[in-house]
Image (cartoon, helix red, strand yellow):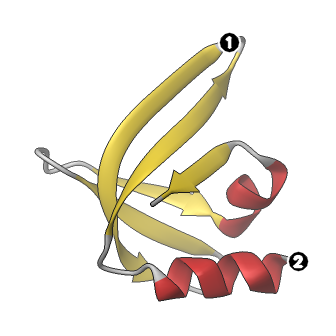
Amino acid sequence: MIDKVKNFVLKNKDKVCEFKLNCGRNQVSMFSGKIVETYKAIFLVQVLDSREVKSFSYSDVLIGNLEIMM
């Protein structure tokens, strides 16, 4: 399963996506960004209109804490 997530992230590298992050206790954060780098266990997202770079693990997507929408 995690290989499917890795392939999806790799295919969408450098494309603008919408991200929905579940922070727990009914706190949801939505932002636009671009996947800028991929590594063995994590990937980096550059937030649009900001210098902020966020890192996520592939398991965040797998368990539903992070949704990537095209």
Residue at 47%, 47% (x, y): give it: 19
Residue drawn at the location 58% of the way across and 71% of the way down: 42
Q: Which mark is residue 51?
A: none
**Quadrant of res 56:** bottom right
Height in image: 66 above or below 42? Answer: above
Q: Is residue 35 above or below residue 31?
A: below
Residue 61 to residue 29: above or below: below
What kind of residue is marked 1?
Answer: Asn
Label 2 sits on residue: 1
Q: Residues within 10 Å of mark 1 (few under 14, many from 20)?
A: few
Point out the residue furthest to the right here: 1
Q: Nearer the viewer, residue 15 or 25?
A: 15
What residue is shown at x 31% (from left), y 47% (from top)?
A: 32
Q: Residue at x 38, y 80 (%)?
A: 37
Position of the C terminus, as image quadrant, is: bottom left
| Residue found at the far front of this picture | 70
Q: Earlier in the sequence, mark 1 or mark 2?
A: 2
Residue 11 image offset from top left, x and y in percent: 50, 87
Q: How many marks?
A: 2
Separation of residues labelled 1 and 2 (CA atoms): 26 Å
Question: Dot 2: what SS?
Answer: loop
In the image, which disc is placed on residue 26?
A: 1
The amino acid on which the numbered mark 2 sits, given as a three-letter code, is Met
Give residue 3's position: percent from left, percent from top. 78, 86
Dot 2: few (<14), some (14–19), or many (≥20) neighbours within 10 Å?
few
Per the image, label 1 sits on a secondary structure element best described as loop
